[in-house]
Amino acid sequence: MTDAPALLSVRGLRVVFDTRGGPLTAIDGVSFEIAAGEILGVVGESGAGKSLTGAAVIGLLDPPGRIAGGSIHLNGQRIDNLPQAGMRKLRGRRIGAIFQDPLTSLHPLLTVGAQIEETIRTHLPMGRTEARARAIGLLQEVGIPSPETRIDQHPHQFSGGMRQRVVIALSLAAEPSLIIADEPTTALDVSIQAQITALLRRLCRQRGAGVMLVTHDMGVIAETADRVAVMYAGRVVEIGPVGTVTRAPRHPYTAGLMASIPRMGKRQASLRQIDGAMPRLGAIPAGCAFHPRCAAADDVCRRAVPVLDAGSHSAACWHSQTAAMVRAGRG
């Protein structure tokens, strides 16, 4: 955690889905903070709850999902209990969003300029001329060539990488203090991924915006984030500075994620993997949810839920030294 005051503070967040068989807990006691100018990477396998956490922060949970506990504060203001009209005002103005597929954020029948200008004029006191000038400036800032011409083009006239740049410009249009970036590079090839992550990092530093970067890719996290929160089965199992977590993970799940990444310049007969799969919502095991996949699990792991320990690098593991065993290939 940084020394700067928290821009975003999430405390004990709990998200449930109401079903005929009763409520299912999808997010269970998640807590973290993001400072201004900081990028927090949130990583985990599909089903870990990372995108759902981002949706809760931005107020886009789809029914029957709902926040059942905890709190979310933005710049000291509690926002999880705002009415829908209040959240709509917040989105775009104080919170920007970047999603995996840029076409879900862009209207296919409107020019990109019209869409950016509409966002600017909705949230900022600007006329048409000022809004257009600002939109051109934003397109230039995110690396769109010839922005004076391309502002009048439609989304289908842009490549995938350029569309994602347009979405980033759209997310910055009203100068938000927080950006939720949910898998923003997944649909792009590797070279374009690197460009987009570098752009996010640069804009975050220049504008002082906090970023919650949701991804399943530890490589993207290592290149982009300041800190990383590793999620498993709806809980944060490890959180800390990205360099520390990636070099010396303290939770066996994090160690397994790191061990599964191919190493440059090192010959490997096969990639290592974490045996098993993420548990379904209705079948999350008692105790540590990771214990069925952990070779070092014992009785305490099966009985009791571990909590994050104190410190800037925290892990929720009864035997955090087992992470070192996994890294050494003994787990």
Image (tube, helix red, strand yellow):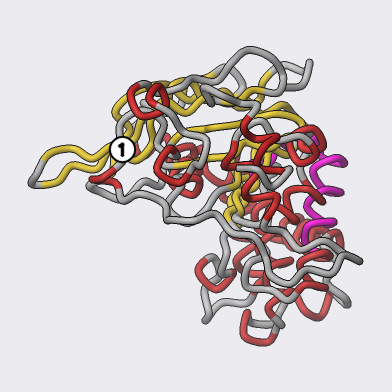
Horizontally, residue 235 falls left or right of residue 197, namely: left
Please check the rendered image and state whether residue 43 is part of the magenta-colored stretch, yes or no: no
Q: Which residues are magenta?
A: 196-212
Q: Residue at x 87, y 65 (%)?
A: 266
Q: Which amino acid lies under the numbered mark 1 shown in the image of this protein? A: Pro
Most common secondary structure along the magenta stretch: helix
Name, please, the residue furthest toward the bottom: 157
Report the quarter where the N terminus lies. top right
Q: Position of residue 238 (x, y in %)?
A: 60, 31
Look at the picture and state if 282 lies above or below 250.
below
* Residue designated by label 1: 285
| Crowd class of label 1 (few under 14; some 14 to 19; many from 20; radius 10 Å) | some
Closer-to-camera residue (3/300): 300
Q: Looking at the image, can residue 122 be seen?
A: yes
The residue nearer to you, when weighing 192 against 89, is 192
Nearer to us in this view, 73 or 15: 15
Residue in view at x 33 percent, y 23 percent: 303
- The picture places residue 230, in percent across and down from the top left corner, at 59, 39
Picture quadrant where residue 261 is located: bottom right
